Amino acid sequence: MHTEHAVVSRPEWEAAREALLAREKALTHSQDALARDRLALPWMRVEKRYQFQGEHGPLGLADLFGGNSQLIIYHFMYAPEWDEGCVGCSFLADHLDAALVHLRHHDVTVVAVSRAPLAKLNAFKRRMGWRFAWLSSEGCDFNGDMHASVPQADGSIEDRPGASAFFRDPDGDIFLTYSAFERGVERLVGAYNYLDFAPMGRNENGPNFNLGDWVRHHDQYDHATSANCHACG
């Protein structure tokens, strides 16, 4: 933890702050340009039929849109053999429910998808108190096709935290429009935006949002130890 800082007069502080503000504005303009380029990406038609398991039975990809034309699927890391979901993905998921009402009124549906059986997802969802829709992709190729699950040389499968965006046109055709993984979905973790304002910043050793050495499942902060993200060791 770095706590030693220069202590200066108000004019000196304001000059340093103005210099940083110029860089922040340049970054904002650059991010705006990047967002425009993201919207201009070509789309890929989704031809394959996928079947997910939901609380009320099997669902196809089209069903996940819930009447909206835009769909974002969060690839939640939860392998079939795990006893609980990834800590980092849970950290991100804690931010989702509050956003849903706003997103639904902006023609956007957001759901989570994992490889674990639905019974495990439902049990962990109850434990965490979440309300968002969480589907199991057990038995279908969705995770692999989206590059959220990557086969390894030893025959195992490694999951990656990420998100994929889709559009459904009036004819019912579905297109993959964007995807991001690992630090590419860090912007969805609202708590990090607060920490970036805080005097000590994120104060963590991990390079990715799901590798932070302080993050716990939100019901585990009072415990001396907690299970780390399975992909992180």
Image (cartoon, rainbow, N blue to C red):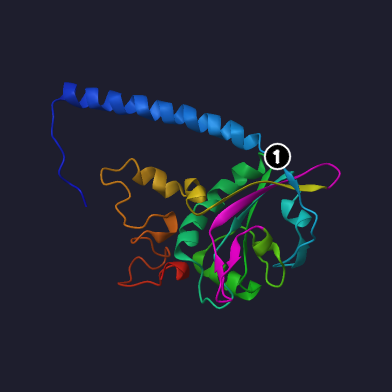
For image coordinates 43% across by 54% down, the residue present is: 209
Q: Secondary structure at mark 1?
A: loop
Can the viewer see residue 150 in this picture? yes
Q: Residues within 10 Å of mark 1 (few under 14, many from 20)?
A: few
What amino acid type should be assigned to the residue bearing mark 1? Pro
Side (left or right) of 59 relative to 230? right
Q: Nearer the viewer, residue 205 or 192?
A: 205
How many numbered badges does the structure rendering display?
A: 1
Q: Magenta stretch?
A: 146-172
Quarter holding residue 178: top right
Quarter holding residue 111: bottom right
Q: Position of residue 138 (x, y in %)?
A: 68, 71
Q: Which residue is mark 1?
A: 42
Side (left or right) of 146 relative to 214? right
Looking at the image, residue 148 lies above or below residue 179: below
Residue lying furthest right: 171
Looking at the image, residue 150 lies above or below residue 62: below
For image coordinates 41% across by 49% down, the residue present is: 191
For image coordinates 68% across by 60% down, the residue present is: 145
Side (left or right) of 78 relative to 60? left
Side (left or right) of 176 relative to 172? left
Residue 222 part of the magenta-drawn span: no
